[in-house]
Amino acid sequence: MRVCVTEKPSVARDIARLLGANDRHDGYFEGNGYQVTWTFGHLCCLKEPDDYTPLWKRWSMASLPMIPQRFGIKLIEDDGIKKQFKVIETLIASADEVINCGDAGQEGELIQRWVYQKARCDKPVKRLWISSLTDESIRDGFNTLQDSSSFDNLYYAGLSRAIGDWILGMNATRLYTLKYAQSRNVLSIGRVQTPTLALIVARQREIENFVPEDYWEIKTKYRDTVFNSTKGKFKTDAAASEIVENIKNFPLTVTSVSKKKGKEAPPRLFDLTSLQVECNKKWGYSADETLKLIQSLYEKKVTTYPRVDTTFLSDDIYTKIPGIMEAMKPYAPLTQPVLAAKIPKSKKVFDNSKVTDHHAIIPTNVDPSTVFLSREEKLVYDLVAKRFIAAFYPDCEFSTTTVMARVNDYEFKATGKEILKDGWRVIFNKDKSTSKEEDNDKEDDVNAVMPTFVEGESGPHEPSLLKKTTQPPKNYTEGTLLRAMETAGKLVDDDELRDAMKENGIGRPSTRAAIIETLHKRHYIAKQRKSLVATPAGVQLIDTIKEELLKSAKLTGLWENKLRKIERGEFSAQQFIDELKTLVNEIVLNVFRDNSSTTIIVATEDKKAKDKNTNGGDSKEKKPRKPRLKSVEEILCPECGTGHLIKGRTAYGCSRWNEGCGLRLPFEQYPTTLTPAKLNTMIKKSYKNK
């Protein structure tokens, strides 16, 4: 019997149908020599501190650093999870072979491996590795099953990430909370979370400390075309006004006219980050909302695997392009020109060297009109579909005209850009903008349409003096923050340079949305329309952390680089963990030695307070009154102190259950009929007596 283990019941149903395992049992399907079962995402997690020793249950400086000799895993405390695990364990015990059908990514590999370890699996394990959930893709995947050992490095990278986050998060959170926090407040520190917060605080400081400066520009209009002084910006009104006086009574003479033709390639295909950025820019979707939408489209089989960080396709996808386009019935007017001609195979689209586990996000060969999609899902699908079609259209051809002129002894310049052939731009003609169009809109002093100029012509003109003021940098939006995380805080517009920097980004495409959400839930950042701002608690936390390693985007990026190298077998997982152990020891020692009396007040503020005061506050000010709790998710976990309450099937748990927190508050003891405020009071009383 071959036992297939998927990550979700819905995937299990699809695989069971294709394999002919049509008999439904409690927790699995069976038939045709197969048994198909499933997990619910994580069934296991790393053990929490007091699982290793009772001494670590109580938060104490004396117990730090907490570093187990050997890390262990345990089942998550949930009756439903325990029941399903028992099914998996029983099936594996009598299996001839196990097929890992988990999500084809690092986290999916970790989820499955932990389950097999906990079930004491000693059977041969094969790996199903697919980039979409279409029937064709699943069949192809079962025809090309791989040995599980081929993905060992992927597992080691996931395990290193989990253990590294445990070592740093558990120890640094307890350390800073015990040393600096006031009352029972918890200061949450994380390997990715803290440097991300530091980016937001640093940008906020730049804005606060920005000193605006006035400057002047000289322009003149000749034949309805704007010419700009080649001297650029002037620091004083007097200097600029003097030049205006010197040119207003002289004619403008054209000294040269040059034309240069150019081509603009289609925008890159989407990876997860660029899709999140685009959705945030167009519709204000949060990174988490976009991830959920594209994940749903993947599960509905109309798009490929979403948690990717490449914008390229592998060569083997080339032969599948016609079938995908033919299936995109609603887009037939756009796909027909491509299908009627020879489909181009550009290195800007197909590049095996730029594809590792999965290729860029593209549509599948499932007609989207045959699947129910919500309004939001349709919008996201449309983005992916048009970006995909555009990749196979010709380049946009344009002509740039540069006209140089002189007035008296002063030089002026005018430029204009004319589209000669729309090329791929016809795909977006009905849309308000594309990313590349928006970039072009930002070009200063480019005349959209210019008359024909002849060298030597001369005539009157209208000079003007324009006063401007330097502007501070803008607050991060979720889109620009995702880009900053991707490039470890550096502002990078060039696609190729950004690709090179992805190795050192903060976090992974699949985790960045969750990091931003975590900062929201812990009240370290707040939203002001589209902008993200640090709360007083967030600012105070970053100011208190002295170790650059904990808040440096660059250094955290180096850790991510090592995790990627572990995936490729170029770096030792043990060395990565040993380095983090050494780091934690140094951090604990440094904080022990710190004699400053810094105290942090972490308080949940109401919306009005957030809007009015986002720049930090005086610790001597009166502590704001806590607002009434509106949901159980606003209640801090009483067990680990860093997560928040979530509602399960039979009990309340902690949002950090997959990081080792085993909180379980059964509904029999803590009824769901209680208001969040009363529930919070009851929990505090209960834990106070422990």
Image: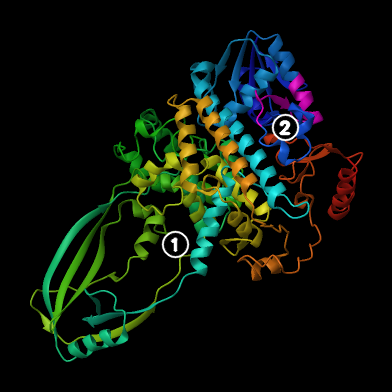
Callout 2: SS: loop
Residue placed most toward the observer, 440 or 635:
635
Residue furthest out toward the left: 456
Callout 1: SS: loop
Q: Which residues are magenta?
A: 67-86
Q: Is residue 624 above or below residue 81?
A: below
Q: Position of residue 190 (x, y in %)?
A: 61, 44
Q: Residue at x 52, y 44 (%)?
A: 549
Q: Is residue 361 above or below residue 134?
A: below
Identify the coloring: rainbow
Residue placed most toward the observer, 459 or 307:
307
The disc labelled 2 sits on which kind of residue? Glu
Q: Does residue 377 appear anywhere in the picture?
A: no
Q: Position of residue 428 (x, y in %)?
A: 40, 55
Which residue lies under the disc numbered 2? 48
Disc 2: CA contacts within 10 A as few (<14), some (14-19) or many (>=20): many
Residue 21 within the segment the image draws in magenta? no
Numbered-mark total: 2
- Residue 432 is tagged as 1
